Image: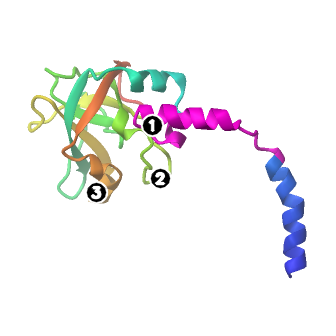
């Protein structure tokens, strides 16, 4: 059995190793230093595209205190204030006197969050909702259906988030 396993590993390993491009040591060290300077884990920093890096380096347009909301079980129901279905981990409620509706946002602290479906959050959110309790410098992150949907962002609850204007959007927020 061990001989068979060794043979399989010997056959598979070269194919796997040759399909991965090597990264120079200096590039990895440089990426680690750059990531640490900007408050990111190295793997998260390396996964960002140039637009995301530029947004992450910009000073905050707003520092907003985070809250969360969800659908079902005492949470939100129906459409957002634009008449759109809220999109989990994309829709936010803000005070429109502070953050205008239809503003595309980049929230640095949400980049790299592992979501319930296994994907990684890219930091983009959409101001398409308002709320009676969202007054002033607060932001309410819509997490999805049920209290369990709040787990990925629970560490951000009541924290001050770095929010950058990343543009605007028409229609409903993209899924």
Residue bearing the label numbered 1: 36
Tell me if residue 148 is in the magenta stretch.
no
Which labelled disc corresponds to residue 156?
Answer: none
Q: Tell me the quadrant of the picture where the N terminus can be found.
A: bottom right
Of badges 2 and 1, nearer the viewer stands 1
Question: Does the CB distance between marks 1 and 3 fall below 8 Å?
Answer: no
Mark 2 and mark 1 lie on one chain; the one further toward the N terminus is 1
**Image quadrant where residue 98 sits:** top left
Between the C-alphas of marks 1 and 3, the distance is 35 Å
Between the C-alphas of marks 3 and 2, the distance is 15 Å
Asked whether 30 or 19 is in front, the reply is: 30
**Image quadrant where residue 128 sits:** top left
Q: Residue at x 47, y 52 (%)?
A: 117
Secondary structure state at the residue bearing disc 3: loop
Q: Residue at x 15, y 27 (%)?
A: 95
Residue bearing the label numbered 2: 117
Question: Does the CB distance between marks 2 and 1 fall below 8 Å?
Answer: no
Q: Give above or below for 93 relative to 71.
A: above
Residue bearing the label numbered 3: 146
């Amino acid at each position: 059995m061990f001989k068979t396993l060794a043979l399989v590993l010997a056959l598979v390993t070269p194919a796997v190793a040759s399909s991965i491009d090597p990264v120079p040591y200096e590039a990895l060290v440089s990426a680690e230093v750059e990531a640490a300077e900007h408050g990111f884990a190295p793997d998260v920093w390396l996964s960002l595209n140039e637009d995301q890096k530029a947004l992450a380096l910009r000073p905050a347009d707003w520092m907003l205190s985070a809250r969360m909301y969800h659908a079902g079980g005492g949470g939100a129901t129906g459409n957002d204030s634009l008449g759109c279905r809220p999109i989990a981990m994309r829709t936010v409620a803000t005070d429109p006197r502070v953050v205008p509706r239809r503003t595309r946002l980049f929230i640095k602290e949400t980049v790299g969050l592992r979501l319930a479906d296994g994907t990684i959050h890219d930091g983009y959110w959409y101001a398409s909702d308002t709320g009676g309790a969202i007054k002033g410098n607060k932001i309410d992150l819509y997490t999805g259906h049920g209290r369990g949907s709040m787990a990925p962002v629970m560490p951000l609850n009541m924290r001050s988030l770095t929010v950058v204007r990343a543009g605007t959007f028409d229609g409903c927020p993209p899924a």
